[in-house]
Image: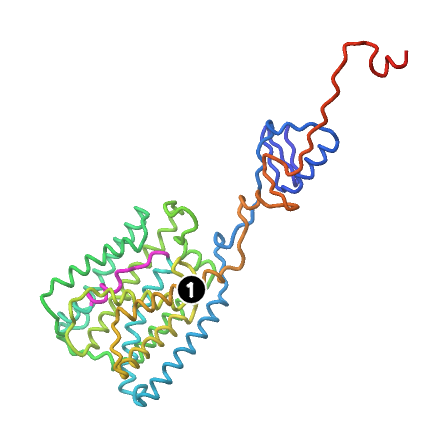
Amino acid sequence: MAYDDTTFRRTGDETTESDPAAYRRRVQYDDTAGTTLDQSLRSPVTATGATQSAEEDGRDRLGIHLSWEVMLLVAAAVIGFLLQREDSAALQRPALDALLVTGASIGLLTLGAGLTLRAGVPNLAIGPIALAAAVQYAENSDKGLVQAIVPAMIVAAAASLAVGLIVTVLHVPGWAATLAAAFGVIVYIQLRPGPVNVQGDWDPTSQAFLLFGGFAVLAVVGAGLGAIGPVRRFLGRTRPTGDPAQRRGVTAAVPAMLTLPLSSLFATGAGVLIAAGADGPIAPETGFEWTGIAIGLALLAGTSAYGRRGGIFGTLFAVTALTLFLRYQVLLELDIALFAIAGSLMVAGLVVTRFVESYGSPYAGRTPEEWNAAPSGGANWSPTLPETWNTPATPAPRSDRWDDGPWGANR
């Protein structure tokens, strides 16, 4: 026997209902009619057609990001005003050219961090990669710009591709795999016995506007593409939605394989700009302070630490604000350590992530469990036990005398 209805379906021995309220009404009706229902023989009720939640669907509210970006723009304007008041020549050439080169190098690092954060595979090696590229450029810049940069870019892209393959095949967190890669890069850096002098004479300030303009275009255009629903959902397929060990298909591996090498190329370019614009030799340190600054800025710009969500102009405004602040604190002789700045940015960025995650989703869908457990009339309802159950009245015991009952009374 098989029949189908909008609220009740039966196929063979399996019974399902899509409307728990209808099921309760039917049970109450059967009890009122005096029908005895054997619940031990009834299959559990399951809900069908549950509404897909916003997390599964991947929809986001970009208005939250735009509102926060207005605040970032105001903060950058205030810092710029304070800097201008402290030193009227700070925003004029040639000092402005140095600011733009600094902003371009920090911006490239932030682009790499934000890209991998959106993909759910944060690259913790971008700081060491940038410092290694700076060391590579310092040692070989006298051989020409191409010979100094291209080998570093090839090595960085190939190594990041290998890390992306590890993340994909083993399905391990991107931050753990890139942290291991960062240790290997640091070993390469610290093989130097001391600071490395820059051998070349290329001055990036002569192309300052072009460099910063290129970063600005990449930031806005890339974020604009990320605001497109299908692109954003594809890029954020590794965003955790349940068991982190559960694979989400082959296409989930593509964002990691693309974003990790691309972020490493951005970090390499940033390292070259840092070395070319440096006033002295490049010290063989760890570079982790630049990782903290880049990831902190990406989070402060509105990119979620959980992946996928991000704004449009946040990276540009956050990088501009920090670049102005770095120059401002030098003028005030505050001498703030880069690690302290990185830690402060990380804390502020995590607060922004909480804000984005709390208000960035259009609605929260109800799961099948919540649907089955939906209360009605102030009582809890269970699929195996209706909230209203009337125990049938016990029939009177039969007598052995043939003249008892209505027939005997009419003798």
Q: In the rendered view of the protein, which quadrant contains the C terminus?
A: top right
The residue lying at 69 percent from left, 33 percent from top is 390
**Whole-percent x and y of residue 136?**
16, 67
**Whole-percent x and y of residue 267?**
26, 66
**Whole-percent x and y of residue 161?**
27, 55
Q: Vertically, is 146 above or below 170?
A: below
Judged from the image, the secondary structure of the residue bearing numbered disc 1 is loop
Q: Which residues are magenta?
A: 120-133
- Of all residues shown, which one is farthest toward the right? 411
**Whole-percent x and y of residue 253?**
35, 51
On the image, numbered disc 1 is attached to which residue? 310
Residue 379 in magenta stretch: no
Q: Vertically, is 75 above or below 406?
A: below
The residue lying at 35 percent from left, 64 percent from top is 114
In which quadrant of the rendered view does residue 394 lie?
Answer: top right
Q: Is residue 285 left or right of residue 398?
A: left
The residue lying at 30 percent from left, 68 percent from top is 342
Q: Is residue 131 left or right of residue 220?
A: left
Residue 128 in magenta stretch: yes
- Of all residues shown, which one is farthest toward the left? 193
Depth order, front residue of 357/98: 357
Q: Amino acid at mark 1?
A: Gly
Depth order, front residue of 18/292: 292
Q: In the rendered view of the protein, which quadrant contains the N terminus?
A: top right
Q: Vertically, is 20 above or below 142?
A: above
The residue lying at 31 percent from left, 77 percent from top is 323
In which quadrant of the rendered view does residue 40 lie?
Answer: top right
